Image: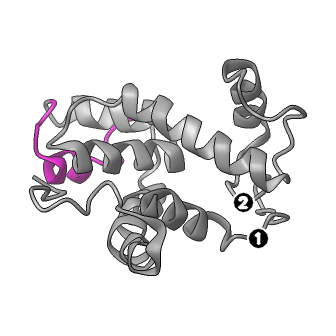
Amino acid sequence: MATFAGQIHQESRWNASAKSPVGAAGMAQFMPATASWICGFAKDLPPGCNVLNPNWAIRALVTYDKYLYDRTPKVGNTCGRMWAALRGYNGGLGHWNKEWQNAGRPSNLKLADASCGTASRAIKHCRENLTYPEKIVTRWQPLYNKAGWGAGVCDYPDVECLQ
């Protein structure tokens, strides 16, 4: 699906051995604690819990996205909910949930995004966290869709992401 391909592109540009300065590794750029947690959570992942294994990383990314999506409040529509899940992937679902609550639990994603930095997250981290889903959904997802990777979560005609 184009959304996941776009996310991997954003995370690592498909570099299986990518490493970030803060310790994230692999195509999906999992932090060590998240990788360890998902290995215990998702028993159907390939054995070895190896973030540098592309097969493991892609399946773990999709599994973790589903986990986040299932725990994201229904903000807007399917696309908006995935947008919020992607913010959770990038900066922690707990931060996003606190900011959403601080904004009065709006159903409009723009109002929820406007509250970034009002909870436990430092305001300096908001720019990256707010642009992360935007890059995936508006820049990379359409390119992967056009290249034949299938529809993305925000490609459907009745979907307006930020409503």
Question: Depth check: 8 or 127 in front?
Answer: 8
Q: Residues within 10 Å of mark 2 (few under 14, many from 20)?
A: many
Question: Depth check: 142 or 21 in front?
Answer: 142
At label 2, the amino acid type is Met
Q: Position of residue 98 (x, y in %)?
A: 34, 30
Q: Position of residue 50 (x, y in %)?
A: 87, 43
Look at the numbered disc 2 and give the secondary structure of its residue: loop
Q: Residues within 10 Å of mark 1 (few under 14, many from 20)?
A: some
Cβ atoms under marks 2 and 1 closer than 8 Å: yes
- Is 39 above or below relative to 62? above
Question: Depth check: 110 or 160 in front?
Answer: 160
Question: Depth check: 110 or 78 in front?
Answer: 78
- Is 157 above or below relative to 46? below
Residue at (14%, 56%) from the top-left corner? 159
Residue at (69%, 28%) from the top-left corner? 38
On whether residue 109 falls in the magenta region, the answer is: yes
Residue at (30%, 37%) from the top-left corner? 99
Left/right placement of residue 72 relative to residue 26 reads: left
Q: Which corner quadrant of the image does residue 17 belong to?
A: bottom right
Left/right placement of residue 110 relative to residue 54 reads: left
The span shown in magenta is 105-119
On whether residue 79 falls in the magenta region, the answer is: no
Q: Position of residue 86 (x, y in %)?
A: 43, 49
Look at the numbered disc 1 and give the secondary structure of its residue: loop
Q: Main secondary structure of the magenta part?
A: loop
Tag shown at residue 15: 1
At label 1, the amino acid type is Asn
Q: CA distance from mark 2 to mark 1?
A: 6 Å
Q: Which residue is mark 2?
A: 27
